[in-house]
Amino acid sequence: MSQVSESKEDRWLDLDLAAANVNRAGTLVGSTIAVFTFLLFFLYPQYSSGRIDPTLFQLTLTIIILTILTFSLSGLYYYRVGVLKLSNAKKRASMQRGALFWLFGTLFIILEPALILFTVGLTAVGVVALMAWLFYTLVTLRDATAYGNLYGST
């Protein structure tokens, strides 16, 4: 009897976690689209007139697009857990893929401020933001095995 209740409890925990992660991913996609729109509205005229570095502007927009993509894919993989009838192994694989895309999205979104600051010519602050991103990346890489095993490898 307790085995059945544990199994049901695990299922609900997975569904609750997946639903919460879908909401988080959706919020971050929306926020990132807002940043993308803001940059296009305010910086594109400067880009077209040659007042900002065109390479940095395009790199910044590319990172924002990749951020939107990775958070969207993360949300999709989490969404699958609650909507599709998946085996436990497929659920865990979907959760792992969602976590991986979430990790990449987080790395990209934290890089965006540095790129924006470099693009508008605020190099000193951009260096601080880039150092903060490097620190975050190192901490994340240190914990990479924990992220890989987050939902079990079995």
Image (cartoon, rainbow, N blue to C red):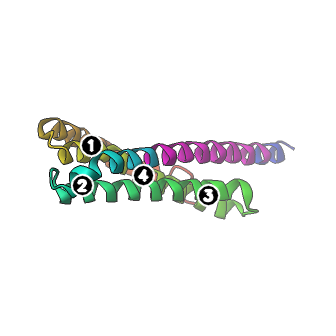
Residue type (three-letter) at the residue carrying disc 2: Phe
**Local crowd at mark 1 within 10 Å, few (<14), some, or many (≥20)?**
many
**Local crowd at mark 4 within 10 Å, few (<14), some, or many (≥20)?**
many
Which residue is denoted by mark 4 in the rendering? 105
Horizontal side, residue 77 vs residue 61: left or right: right
Horizontal side, residue 87 vs residue 62: left or right: right
Residue 71 is marked as none
Q: Nearer the viewer, mark 1 or mark 2?
A: 2
- Residue 100 appears at what percent x and percent y? 47, 56
Which residue is denoted by mark 3 in the rendering? 92
Q: Report if residue 64 is visible in the image.
A: yes
SS of the residue at dot 2? helix
- Residue 53 appears at what percent x and percent y? 16, 54
**Local crowd at mark 2 within 10 Å, few (<14), some, or many (≥20)?**
many
Q: Would residue 141 be counted in the magenta stretch?
A: no
SS of the residue at dot 1? helix
Distance of label 4 from label 2 (alpha carbons) = 19 Å
- Residue 133 appears at what percent x and percent y? 27, 43
- Provide the residue span drawn in magenta: 8-32
* Cβ atoms at labels 3 and 4 below 8 Å apart: no
Residue type (three-letter) at the residue carrying disc 4: Gly
Distance of label 3 from label 1 (alpha carbons) = 29 Å
Residue type (three-letter) at the residue carrying disc 1: Trp
